[in-house]
Each structure stands twice: as C-alpha cells, then as structure tokens.
Amino acid sequence: MSGTGSSAGGSTGNADSTSAIPGGGGAPGRPAVAGGTSAHANARRGPVVAALMLGMALAALDGTIVSTAVPQIVGDLGGFAVFSWLFSGYLLAVTVTLPVYGKLSDTFGRKPVLIAGIVLFLIGSLLCACAWNMGSLIAFRVVQGLGGGAIQGTVQTIAADLYPLRERPKIQAKLSTVWAVSAVAGPAVGGLLAAYADWRWIFLINLPVGATALWLIARHLHEPSRTKTAAASRPRIDWAGALAVFACGGLLLFALVQGGVAWPWLSAPSLALFGASALLAAATVAIERRAAEPIIPGWVWRRRTIAAVNLALGALGLLMVAPTVFLPTYAQAVLGLGPIAAGFVMSVMTLSWPVSAALSQHAYNRIGFRLTAIIGIACSALILLAFPLLPFPGAAWQPALIMLLLGAALGLFQLPLIVGVQSTVGYAERGTTTASVLFCRQVGQSVGAALFGAVANATLASRLAAAPDGIREGLPGDLDSVSHALADPGSLTAEAADYLRRAVDTAVDHVYIGAAIAAVLALLALVFVAPRRFPVITEEAPAD
C-alpha cells in the first residue's frame, strides 16, 4: 500500500505516494479511493455499510435501552445501591480499550478486530441475560464494554476507509442517524420489553442484530492485501503498553465515577486513586516511549491537527453531560414533565444533529474543516449560555428549542473534525487516530459527569443551607434525600416544593454555564492549536 503516513506538524506526507488537496480542508482536488478500497470493493459497500450501521446500533442502543429497564432489573436482582455500575462499568471498559483496539486495527486490519469485538459484545449480552444477581450482571456488562470499544472505534475507521473525502459525509450522516434513532427508540423498546416480556430480552435482542452484522462483514468486507514487506515482518504488539493504558485509564475513570458519590472528593480513597492514576500515567508514558510499536504513539499529540481535534472533542464530551444527564432532571423537577415527555425534550437534539452533520460538507468544502468547526462550537457556546436565561418555570418548548439549535450547532462542529482528522492520515494510522479522538471524547464525558455533578451538588447544598427558616424545616435534610423529594413532591409543603424546584433550576443553570465554558475551551483549541488548513492527503487504491 502506498501513502500510509503523514509527517508531524502539517506536511502532507511522502510526495511520491500522497498529494495535498488544495485548500487543506477545503474542496478536495480529485476523488480518490480512501483507505485502500478498490473499484470492485466499492461495489460491495452497500452490505458493508449495512453491517456497520447494525454494529453501531448495538453500541448506540445499549445505554438507552438498559436505562429504561433498571426498575425491573433492580426489582428482580436487587442491588439498588450499585446499579449505576451497570452504566459506569460498561463506560469504563469501552473507554480504556479504545486506544488498544485502534492500534490493533492498524496492525492486523479492521476486519478481525471488528469481528472479535462483535463476538465479545454478543457473548457479554448472552451472559447478561443469564445473570443471577447484580454483581454478575455488572461483571457481564464489563464484558459487553470490552466488545463495545472495538465496535465504536473500528466502525468509524472502516467508514473512513470505505469512502473518499468527498463522500465521507454520507456514511457519517448514516452513522449519526443510527445514534439519533437509538436515542428515541431505545427507551421505548426497553420499556416495552421490560413491561410485556422480561428485562433479559433487552440483552437477547442483540443476538440476531449482531449475528446479521457478523455475516455481512465476513462475507462482504474485503480489506486490501498487505505488501510483501509488510506481510513478511512479524507484527509487534505492545502488550505492556496496552496493560498500562488499561490500568491507568480504568483507575482514573473509577476515581471520577466514585468521587463525590461513594466517598468525598478530598477523602483518602479519592486522593489515593488519583495519586495512583498519576503514577500509572507516568509509567505509561515511559513504557510507550521505549516501545517499538506503542499503543498510543507520540505523534498523536505531536501533530497539531490531531492534538487540536483530541482537545476539542474532549471538551465536547465534557459539555455533552449538561443536556444528556441534567436536562431530564430539569424537565421533570422544574417543568413538571413525565419521563417520556422529558426524554423528548432531550431527544430533539438528536434530530437536528445528523441533519446538520450531513449538510456540513457544503460548509467545509468552501471554508475548510477548521473554520466550519469554529463556527459550530461558537454557536454552541452562545446557545448553552441562553439556557440560564429561560424563565422559571417556563414551558417545555423553550428548552426543546434550545436543544434543537444545540444539535444543529454540534453537528456543524463534530463531523468536520472527524472527517478532517481522518483525512490527514493514511490507512496504516487511521485506526489509532480515530481511537484517540473517541478516547478523548469518552474521557471528557467521564470528567464532565464528575465535575458537573460536583457543581450541581454544591449549588443545591448552598441553596438548601440558605433557605429561609420558615421553609428550611420542610426541605430535605441532605442531598441524598433530594432525589426522593423530587420523585414525590407531594411530601413537601407548597413553599418547600417551589423553593426546591428553584434550587434545581439554579443548579442546572450553573451546569449549562460550565458546559458553555467547555465549548469555549474547544474553541480556543481550534483557534490556537489547530493549523489554519488541515493537511489532507489522498491515497491511491492498491491492487486487490
């Protein structure tokens, strides 16, 4: 294969094998078969794209479909105190394995990694359906997450391999649509299965979907053959680096998930976990510097384009906590909506996001990837700052309109960065690059959940402490009791209920201000770190 790499700092790679696209992120020069797909392979893209969408649906539906069935799961298995680890355990496994799978897909090819990931996910799903208590279900959800990490990263990488730059928005819009449909359909499907069948079916339903995706991939996905030189050399896997990345990421995310929940932030367990994470991070850097083929190579951060996109999408993960985690609470506690209506207020964002993403190509083909993303994230910051200006208690259409606009702005921000950064590297580096971007976004989401959770808790605690004497006696005595009071507002006096609703409104306002600050951080990364023009390369199709 020719043209598999690009040098750091903005050059477009080996001039003998790659050619720069005039404009560097603007209109492509000539169409090229990206990722090493041949002409007759392109004819088989339809079944492969269907397989990618089915594989992505496994990961996209997972969180939404499980969350709806939590009451039935807890009622059957018990373990209410630890049920949140059904989601945290899965998230940990996905996040810490993304860099490992990215490197493996660059070393051994996308197909074996994706097949292994889907098989592992399906094994985890079957085990989840057979769980006998909450502990076993959490453990099997971790197995699912180990497969989910391979699915998320490799599907995005194959999507970039299949399509040349001009056509990449098509497949990315389709994958965005999968997430949008999952956000709307997942809670409904989960509720129906939990109510009229059994909660175990929410895991068993993955089996036919995954089996179909496996069949399509095995039959229709044909990767380019390796050159004799590449085939003759034995791949070297940095297993020490993989273990170090897994341990460091897992410990850090565990500290973020449990901090402020299982123990105070400044307690001995939190300080010990963060200290151990820092030591493991230093050990990981030392191991990766010595490795011949590191899991997280240094060029991921030395190249300005990749580093800027990593930072920007890490900030995206941070700000996404506001609409996905805190908006449903706001809709139910402040607006008085039911769970279904509250879910709709949030889900309108997923309706405008894929539409905006699909149309973003018309912008970045004219003005470039960087400027398009800058416009998107700048609009996102302004939209997030508009949320605290909503009247109290307001009407449901007001936050819904804000979420609709936010989805449109973020679609204009995220897709150009993903398409752009994937287009700056060759086939042999695309898996690692894509995984690093997704890894930073996942870490940002975990950090955001911990950080904004602390902001919301501090605001609520302050408001409860500052309540007038006549109202304070009717309010919950601590933060743990707030959720029970919000679930049963009839247990409070009218004055106390109104005060608590206003306190929640203020807490969510502060979270959205924090999300706007995260958007500004993403903007600064693009303005000061990203090059003015992305060093896009094209690749010739190898003989198949």
Image (cartoon, helix red, strand yellow):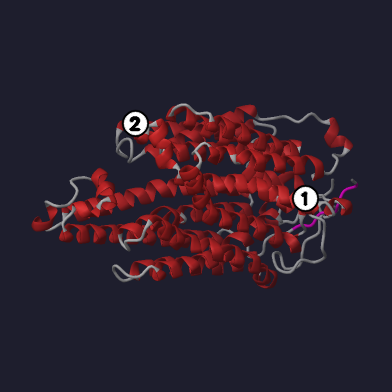
Magenta segment: 537-543
Q: Main secondary structure of the magenta part?
A: loop
Q: Amino acid at mark 1?
A: Pro
The answer to whether residue 154 of the structure is visible from this angle is: yes
Magenta highlight on residue 456:
no
Circle on res. 420: none
Residue at screen point 51% across, 56% down: 316
Task: State the image coordinates of residue 487 (x, y, percent, origin top left).
Answer: 29, 50
Circle on res. 269: 2
Quadrant assignment for the N terminus = top right
Res. 408 image quadrant: bottom right
**Count of numbered circles on the image:** 2
Q: Foreground residue, 158 or 287?
A: 158
Q: Which residue is mark 1?
A: 47
Judge from the rendering whether residue 71 lies leftward or rightward of residue 430; answer left or right.
Answer: left
Q: Residue furthest right?
A: 543
Q: Foreground residue, 421 or 98?
A: 98
* In this rendering, the label closer to the viewer, 1 or 2: 1
Q: Amino acid at mark 2?
A: Pro
Q: Secondary structure at mark 1?
A: helix
Magenta highlight on residue 541:
yes
The answer to whether residue 6 of the structure is visible from this angle is: no
Q: Mark 1 or mark 2, which has the lower sequence index? A: 1
